[in-house]
Image (cartoon, rainbow, N blue to C red):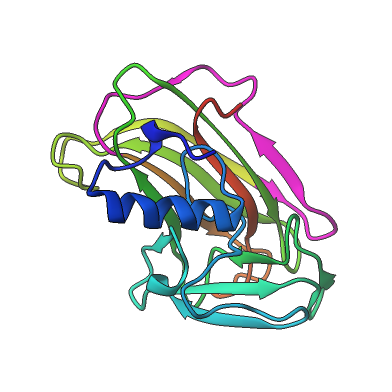
Amino acid sequence: DFPMHALIFRPLAVFATLASLAAASGAHAGLINGGFETSTGTPFVADGNWALAHQSSVAGWQTTASDAQIEIWGNNFNSASGGPVPAYEGRQFAEINATQFATLYQDVFSIGAGSVVGFEFAHRGRSGVDTMRMMITDLGLDNLLGGGDDTELFSRDYSTGNTAWAFYTSSGEAPITTLGNATRFSYQAISTASNSVSVGNFIDAANFGVGVQ
């Protein structure tokens, strides 16, 4: 089920579209397409392959990259130094960096003030230990990042090697309480083992919102 509190309340047709996308992607509370399985044409990446796609083609997700490209890998694509990389769940996953250092994010509206939110995600390095940052930000009254009234609700760096996926959650963290404006959940590339801007920081099985532990 896709919770009502995690959606922008818009006309019925738009609501139905978002709900169907969520159901199709196996999405969890508070987000769309957490496993990067659902698209609007491309990428449906074959096993052992990869693709670059404009963010408009990757349901739910946006990127801060100036070219708006998101990199999607199919199950068991062969990373040059790490061997075939299986998806953590499903058949596809994303690399946070496509052609440049960037942040993958979703903005969630209509989470009421005082709600406690959580997160979980799978992370893996590509050619060694990669580091990414998980952030939760209240976007303020203007609902825009960088408007001068943003509030950082959570931020932590996670470093993972390339031999296996690690699954991280908000369990054990101090309660993350929302302020009632749009809430941005984001995954930012910090560094990669190769020092290449376009290599590293795989992510899969993302989940965030109210009721997520």
Residue at point 46% right, 74% down? 40
Whether residue 140 appears in this view of the structure is yes
| 174 relative to 130 in the view: left or right | left
Q: Nearer the viewer, residue 183 or 148?
A: 183
In the image, residue 209 sits, relative to residue 69, either above or below, namely above
In the image, residue 102 sits, relative to residue 7, either above or below, namely below
Does the magenta portion include 155?
no
**x, y percent for residue 175:** 49, 17
Q: Where is the C terminus found, in terms of image quarters?
A: top right
Does the magenta portion include 172?
yes
Q: Nearer the viewer, residue 210 or 62?
A: 210
**Magenta portion: prevailing SS class:** loop
Residue at point 75% right, 69% down? 127
- Asked where in the image residue 78 lies, by quadrant, the reply is bottom right
**x, y percent for residue 21:** 48, 58
Q: How many marks?
A: 0
Residue at point 58% right, 21% down? 173
Residue at point 54% right, 63% down? 96
Q: Nearer the viewer, residue 52 or 41?
A: 41
**x, y percent for residue 193:** 68, 64
- Start and end of the magenta stretch? 159-182
- Asked where in the image residue 181 lies, by quadrant, the reply is top left
Whether residue 82 appears in this view of the structure is no
**x, y percent for residue 53:** 48, 79
In the image, residue 40 sits, relative to residue 189, either above or below, namely below
